[in-house]
Image (spheres, rainbow, N blue to C red):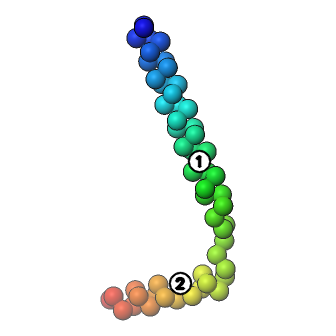
């Protein structure tokens, strides 16, 4: 087989693999919640700031 044709098919197969991987990652990340409950976010920030104060 010609090197050019062989390289073309290898390149296309890699391109298709990358596209499938990107779509799979997008599918799994779209199911995650887009926001955190406001009270939970405040609680996490408070805990984080307490840890910072103790470490100094």
Task: Look at the picture and state if 26 lies above or below 14.
Answer: below
Whether residue 13 sits left or right of residue 31 in the image: it is: left
Residue 7 vs residue 46, the one in the foreground: 7
**Residue 20 position in % (x across, y down):** 57, 40
Q: Residue at x 44, y 11 (%)?
A: 4
**What x and y, as percent, mark residue 41?**
60, 81
Outermost residue on the left side: it is: 56
- The number of numbered badges drawn on the structure is 2
As drawn, 24 above or below 29: above
For the residue labelled by badge 1, is the local secondary structure a helix, a strand or a loop?
helix
Which residue is the extreme one toward the top? 2
Relative to residue 6, is residue 23 drawn left or right? right
Residue to which mark 2 is pinned: 45
Sequence order check: which comes first, mark 1 or mark 2? 1
Residue 21 x %, y %: 54, 43
How many neighbours does mark 2 have within 10 angstroms: few (below 14), some (14-19), or many (20 or more)? few
Marks 1 and 2, how far apart in space?
32 Å
Q: What residue is at 49 percent from the left and 88 percent from the top? A: 47
Kind of element beneath mark 2? helix
- Residue at the image position 61 percent from the left and 84 percent from the top: 40
Q: Position of residue 46 (x, y in %)?
A: 52, 89
Is residue 17 depicted above or below 27 in this figure? above
Please state, as top left, top right, bottom left or bottom right, where the C terminus lies in the image: bottom left
Q: Residues within 10 Å of mark 1 (few under 14, many from 20)?
A: few
Reading the image, the residue beneath label 1 is 24
Instruction: From the viewer's side, name the closer residue of 43 and 6.
Output: 6
Q: Quadrant of the N terminus?
A: top left
* Comparing labels 1 and 2, the label whose residue is closer to the camera: 1
50 to the left or right of 33: left
Residue 54 found in image quarter: bottom left
Residue at image coords 61%, 45%: 23
């Amino acid at each position: 087989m010609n090197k050019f044709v062989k390289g073309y098919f290898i390149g296309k197969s890699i391109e298709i693999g990358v596209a499938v991987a990107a779509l799979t990652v997008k599918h799994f990340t779209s199911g995650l919640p887009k926001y955190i409950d406001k009270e939970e976010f405040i609680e996490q920030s408070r805990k984080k700031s307490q840890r910072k104060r103790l470490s100094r």
